[in-house]
Image: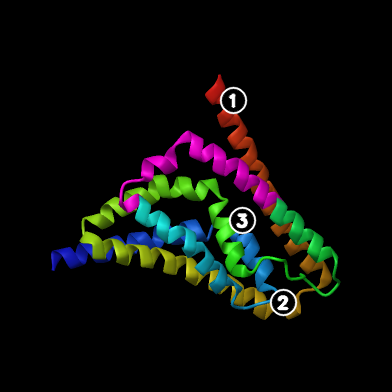
Amino acid sequence: MEVITDFFFFLLSVIFISLSGVMTPGPLFAVTVAKSFKSKIAGVQISFGHGVVEFPLMFLIYFGFAQLLASIMTQIIIGLIGGIIMIYMGYRMIKAEKKTSEGFEESRHSSLITGILMTGANPYFLLWWATIGAALIVKATAFGFMGFLVFAITHWLCDLFWNTFVSVTVFKSRRFWTRRVHNVIFSFCFLVLVGFGAWFIISALLQVANFLA
């Protein structure tokens, strides 16, 4: 009975920590808003794309690869490549938006692929898993492999819940968007992607400079 109680409170902590991370505005949130203008299930598809990267990552950490994710070289490589990808995605978004007066034109990437790209291109996503996420996984292993599986699914369901909520809210409210509101929202999404992309690149270059110093 004590083990069940401990596991219950552990899952509650996982839910609160996971939601605090996923609800923070970032690149994944920006593309979810942009994609949701055309589809109310965009959030679901993006979450599955996110899971394509996240589930293997959780298993890697479970089997002891957290140090690889936390290495400086890994952070530099992901930071540079990820920054370029995010700036490109921001450019594609604003370019497509300007081509139509009716709203966001569907980009060449599906919501599923976008979820994969925005997750894999985010070095701070990897760093979160190498630190906070790894600590949660260590706690989950105290409840055995099944405890780890329940933890992994619970964490991903938090992502799914929030992205779906954002997606449905945007899709249902789009009829009330004036052209000005539309421009402001997509400009915000563009700035988030480009801003994070530039931040990732600059951070990676500073790490290179420190490494060579």
Helix, strand or loop for disc 1? helix
Measured as percent of width and height from the top left, residue 20 is found at 47, 58
Helix, strand or loop for disc 2? helix
Q: Look at the image and say whether residue 210 sits in the magenta stretch.
A: no
Q: Are marks 3 and 2 in contact (CB under 8 Å)?
A: no
Q: Residue at x 56, y 40 (%)?
A: 77
Q: Residue at x 66, y 69 (%)?
A: 35
Q: Residue at x 62, y 66 (%)?
A: 32
Crowd rating for badge 1 (residues with CA inside 10 Å; few <14, some 14–19, many 20+): few
- Give me the C-alpha separation between circle 2 and circle 1: 45 Å
Seen in the picture, residue 175 relative to 24 is either above or below; the reply is: below
Question: Which disc is residue 27 wearing?
Answer: 3
> Which residue position is annotated with label 1?
209
Question: Of tags 2 and 1, which is closer to the observer?
Answer: 1
The kind of residue tagged 2 is Arg
Measured as percent of width and height from the top left, residue 115 is found at 57, 63
Between residue 48 and residue 169, name the one nearer to us: 48
Helix, strand or loop for disc 3? helix
Measured as percent of width and height from the top left, residue 98 is found at 84, 64
